[in-house]
Amino acid sequence: MEPLSLAFPLAPDTLDWGVVAQFESDDWQFVIDNADYLAEGLGVTILLTVTSIVLGFLAGFPMGAIEVYGRGPLRSVVYGAGVVLRAIPIVVILVFMFFVAPIPFPSGQFSAWLPGIGSFSFGTSAFLAATVGLGLRSAAYQAQIFRGALQSVSGGQMEAARSVGMSKLQGIRHVVLPQALRRSIPGFQNEFTIVLKDTSIAIAIGLTELFKRADDLFVQQTTATLELFLAISLVYFVMTFATNRTLDFLGDYYAIPGGDR
C-alpha cells in the first residue's frame, strides 16, 4: 500500500497569482458597482440608529430619574424592567417584537431621503419593530447612564437650591439636570456606538439595512465575501469615529467651567 500524501492540493507555488489578482480586482469592482445599493442600506441604518437612540433617551431619562428620585412600586417596576431588558439578547427582543408582540405595526413600504444618499425604501413593519426593540433595550442602558449622572451631582447643590426657595422639582430641573446631562455625554458615546452596531442584528427580521444588503450581495457573488464586509466595516468605523468626535466636541464645549465634565 502506498503511503498517504499529506501535500496540500493547491500549494502556493502552483497557484496562478495573476488569476488570483484578477479575481480580487473583479470582487472589488463588484463592490464599487453596487455602492448605490449599499448606500440605500446605509440610509436605513442611519435612520434606525437615530430613531432608536431618540426613543431610548425619551424612555431612558425618565427611568433613570425614577430610579434616583422615585419611591414605591413605580421605582420597583422601572428597576425590574431595566434588569429584564438588559438581560435578554437583542436578537431575541427583535424577533419577539416582530413576530410575537401584539403590536399592530403598519405594513407596506416607507420611502425616505437623506442628503448624500438620496431616496430609499424599506419595510415599515420591520423598521418599527426594530426601532421599538433597539429603543427599549437602549432605554434600559441609558437609564443607568442618567442615574449615575444624576447621582454624581452632590446633594449639597439640591440643598442650596431648596434654601433659596426652589421646590424639589425646580431644583432638579434648574440645578441637577443641566449638570447631569453634561456628565452623561461620555456614557452616551458608548451607547450610541452599541446601538449603531446592533442595527445589523435587524437582519434577523429581514430589515434591509446595511448589513442585510451586504449579505444579499454576498449571495450573488460569493467570492466577494471579504471585500463586501471590509467595505461595510469601514462604513461602520467612519460613522462611529465621526459621531464620537462630535460628542467629544460637545462635551468640551458644554463642560462645566472649573468643574468635572
Image: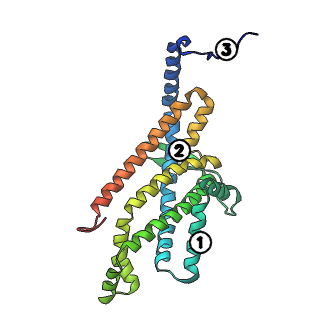
Instruction: Determine the CA span between mark 1 and mark 2.
Output: 39 Å
- Name the residue carrying label 3: 5
Picture coordinates of residue 122 (x, y %)? 58, 47
- Name the residue carrying label 1: 80
Most extreme residue toward the top is: 2
The amino acid type of the residue labelled 1 equals Gly
In this rendering, would 171 be left or right of 32?
left
Instruction: Determine the CA span between mark 3 and mark 2.
Output: 55 Å
Q: Quadrant of the C terminus?
A: bottom left
Q: On screen, 25 above or below 67?
A: above
**Mark with earlier residue (3, 2):** 3
- Name the residue carrying label 2: 120
State yes or no: discs 1 and 3 in contact (Cβ < 8 Å).
no
- Residue 152, disc: none
Q: On screen, 72 above or below 180?
A: below
The amino acid type of the residue labelled 3 equals Ser
Picture coordinates of residue 134 (x, y %)? 56, 57
